[in-house]
Image (spheres, helix red, strand yellow):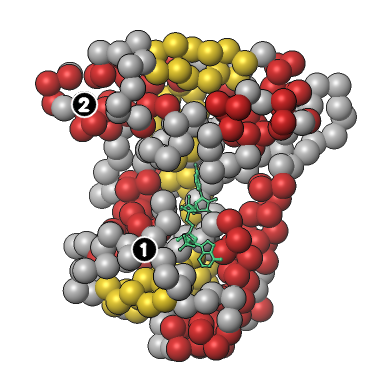
Amino acid sequence: MVTFKKVVLFGSNGQIGEPILEALANCKTQSFDITAVISPNADQPSASKSPNVTVQSADIFKKQDLVPLLKNADVVISALNGKGLEAQALIQDVAAEAGVKRFYPSEYGMHHIYRKPGDDTGHVHPMWDQKALINERAVRHPAIASGAMSYTMIGCGDFYNQPREPVWCPWSQKDVESYTFHILGSADAKADFTHTHDFARYLVASLCAPDVSHNAELNFTSEHISHTEIAALLEKHSGKKVEMLKISDDDKWAVVEDPKKAPKEQTESAFPVDFWYLVKGTQGDGAFWRPPGQVHNHLFPDVQVTTFDMYFKEMFGKSSS
Ligand SMILES: NC(=O)c1ccc[n+]([C@@H]2O[C@H](COP(=O)([O-])OP(=O)(O)OC[C@H]3O[C@@H](n4cnc5c(N)ncnc54)[C@H](OP(=O)(O)O)[C@@H]3O)[C@@H](O)[C@H]2O)c1
């Protein structure tokens, strides 16, 4: 059986990269030699002091920086985002030349075609299209086609514990007097949500079972739940009121067509406002979940999930239950 030892992680100080680095460093099943790549002058990732982690800074757009990083590596994990995603193709090329055996593209989401009322064709938001293009290229890389390299691509639900997203994840804020959930469509529609630390442990579990995750597209969810249910749990644990601010279909499509029409307070996000409208709109349409057969939690049953109930209990203290 194959066992991977040397792992190079790109985007190691990002929102998803940090939990992946922690899960790799603290893996109980096996020990990895981990190179955590950061951009020049970037902050050290939180797990940088772990004995099995070496932090290396590099310009990921320069082949001469990548070659020494990837020498003798078994696995490359990309947790890149934004501009950095554009370097992923070069990273995979250099990884192939170095004989890297497994590649994890920075997928970590769920894509949707959206349909406007009265329009007889589907549309893809540029952010989903960018990811789709990058993913298509990653899994059809010549090294993968030849069998020299394999891939593991992991999708998930909406990451719900993103404190930097006060509008997208209002429940992740602690020091507020009350909460406002922005509802597009039905608040009762259930959607797939994922906790970043659960996700990171799932990714590492897949790395510890290379045969199971060989050339595999896997999906992982922490909880399938509606905004109405999240609101009830949040009110119970925080003791604070949750207001449901309904955005009409007309307003939704107006903002998707022209994001400048969004109220300013709704633009507080790392993502463009039309993008989160489409994500929340898909949730409210009851379409932001994967059907049975497309969720693969069962492959790694030791990975514990964090439900919203557990997350709020941790956030507001055990006395809140
Ligand atoms: N399912 C969901 O709800 C959800 C939510 C958010 C993200 N995601 C996905 O998760 C993945 C990671 O996103 P994230 O939220 O963790 O992103 P993030 O916090 O912005 O982190 C991105 C990482 O990429 C690095 N990076 C970006 N540009 C770079 C460059 N030019 N050179 C070197 N490094 C660069 C950043 O390093 P520096 O900061 O040092 O440049 C950082 O470590 C993406 O695929 C994203 O689409 C999914």
Beta carbon at label 1 within 8 Å of ligand 1: yes
At 42% from the left edge and 76% from the top edge, which residue is drawn? Answer: 57
The residue carrying mark 2 is 316
Which of the pair 144/44 is nearer the observer? 44
Tag 2: amino acid = Phe
Instruction: Say left or right for 143 vs 233.
Output: right
Can residue 3 be seen in this snapshot? no
At 26% from the left edge and 19% from the top edge, which residue is drawn? Answer: 238
Q: Quadrant of residue 285?
A: top right
What secondary structure is marked by label 1?
Answer: loop
Can residue 103 be seen in this snapshot? yes
What mark, if any, has residue 212 been given in the picture? none
The quadrant of the rendering that contains the C terminus is: top left
The image shows residue 267 at horizontal and vertical percentages of 58, 32
Q: Is residue 208 above or below residue 253?
A: below
State the separation of the CA atoms marked 1 and 2. Answer: 29 Å
At 54% from the left edge and 75% from the top edge, which residue is drawn? Answer: 60
The quadrant of the rendering that contains the N terminus is: bottom left
Which of the pair 248/221 is nearer the observer? 248
Q: Is residue 70 above or below residue 304?
A: below
The residue carrying mark 1 is 43
Q: Nearer the viewer, mark 1 or mark 2?
A: 1
Q: Earlier in the sequence, mark 1 or mark 2?
A: 1
Q: Is residue 159 above or below residue 169?
A: below
At 57% from the left edge and 27% from the top edge, which residue is drawn? Answer: 266
The image shows residue 72 at horizontal and vertical percentages of 41, 88
What secondary structure is marked by label 2?
Answer: helix
